[in-house]
Image: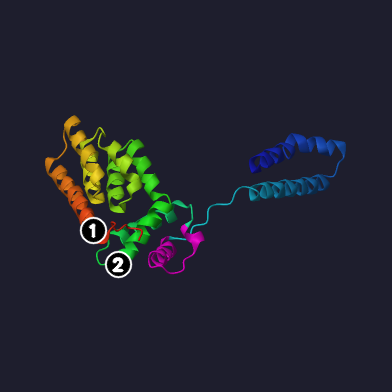
Amino acid sequence: MDSAVDAMLSVILSPATMTIVVVLGVSTLFISRALRKGEMQLRLLTSRSHGNSPEKKWVFGAYRVGEEVSNLVSGKPHRGEVLASRAAVDRQAMEASLLKAISTVGHDENVRVRARRAFEQYGFVAQHCACLLSASNAFDRTTSARILGVAKSNSALPFLFQGLYDQEATVRNQVILSLGKLGLPSAIGPILEAACLQQGMSNALMRQSLSFCSFADDSQNHVSTTTGSPLREDD
């Protein structure tokens, strides 16, 4: 709009146009004032049209987001509008804070449970499940597979099973590690099947993950025989 106004003024105030104005006997001062008034009105309309455009997403910042995540995982009151921010920098800060709460040694188990639950509820598990299967960069797929292992979300299991057949060996090996971190006995069969169909999988990683899954099966059986039902993370 500003460029259009400037172009109009340059044409109207050109020497040829002003010559015509003088010949017709019209006051140059009057013409100039009228043009300036019209220019101001046009610029006012332009500013109003810009003001009607969608506002930018509010950014709370990493420090504020980190504080609210700390309150959330500690079971304290927290500001939902901060954690629900869709700004990219806020989402990155929230993801990093939740992963830190999950993986930090010495944290109370209740803190980890709340952090894992929030990591899934706020869409980070779904985000990395999609990235694992659709990202064009092998590094991004490997990173998502690793994060899903840290999050230990059961809902990521079908996507990790698909990741066992990734075209890159580094991604497949990271998926095996993540399945071992989940420690679910239901992962034993898919790991063995993928090992028979795919090449380049690390035997050491497979043994380690299968051991974790088998140990989890034994521990669950032990808990069920002593207490009547296995403990769940949500309890």
Q: Quadrant of the N terminus?
A: top right
Residue type at tag 1: Val
Q: What label does residue 108 carry, if any?
A: 2
Whether residue 52 can be seen here? yes
Q: Residue at x 64, y 41 (%)?
A: 3
Q: Secondary structure at mark 2?
A: loop
Q: What label does residue 17 carry, if any?
A: none
Residue situated in front as seen by the camera: 214 or 69? 214
Q: Residue at x 20, y 36 (%)?
A: 169
41 w.r.t. 190: above or below: below
Residue at numbered disc 1: 223
Whether residue 175 can be seen here? no
Which segment is the magenta one?
62-83
Q: Residue at x 78, y 46 (%)?
A: 32
**Discs 2, 1 touching: Cβ within 8 Å:** no
Say left or right for 51 vs 229. Answer: right
Residue situated in front as seen by the camera: 216 or 49? 216
Magenta stretch encompasses residue 76: yes
Q: Secondary structure at mark 1?
A: helix
- The residues tagged by marks 2 and 1 sit, at their Cα atoms, a distance apart of 21 Å
Residue type at tag 2: Asp
